[in-house]
Image (cartoon, rainbow, N blue to C red):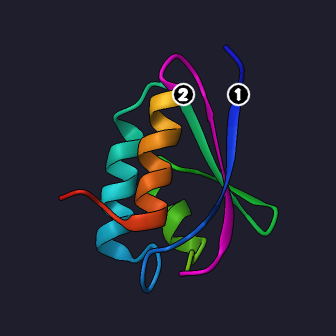
Amino acid sequence: MTMLQKQIVVGLDPGLESRVASYFVQKASSFNSDILLIKNEKRVAAKSIMGIMASAIRRGDSVMLITNGHDEEKAIHVLGDILTSGPDE
């Protein structure tokens, strides 16, 4: 098991705002893996709503998604999809 990382250009409009940020954190928290988001070299835990909101992730931003753990492959796929196209609600 090795750490996975994926560079993502955020496709959400207008970005990772409150409702979608809450959904993203809820999904991230459902995985056992450690999950980080990096924007402009600032690392935040994907399971922290305060960290995600403080990152002010907007449409067109490039972020690095990093997962590390037993369910890292599923986590990077599901969370990457949310960042590019939004929740599947």
Magenta range: 59-72
Report x, y in % for residue 28. 42, 43
Observer-nearest of 9 and 57: 9
Above or below, comparing residue 60 to residue 81 in the picture: below
Observer-nearest of 44 and 8: 8
Report x, y in % for residue 57. 57, 75
Give the mark nearer the N terminus: 1 vs 2. Answer: 1
Q: Name the amino acid, label 2.
A: Glu
Q: Which residue is mark 2?
A: 72
Quadrant in the picture for residue 74 = top left
Residue 71 sits inside the magenta stretch: yes
Mark 1 in CB contact with mark 2 (< 8 angstroms): yes
Q: Name the amino acid, label 1.
A: Met
Within 10 Å of disc 1 (Cα), the crowding (few <14, some 14-19, many 20+) is: some
Q: Which residue is mark 1?
A: 3
Asked whether, in this view, residue 64 is left or right of residue 24, the answer is right
Asked whether, in this view, residue 65 is left or right of residue 43, the answer is left
Observer-nearest of 35 and 50: 35
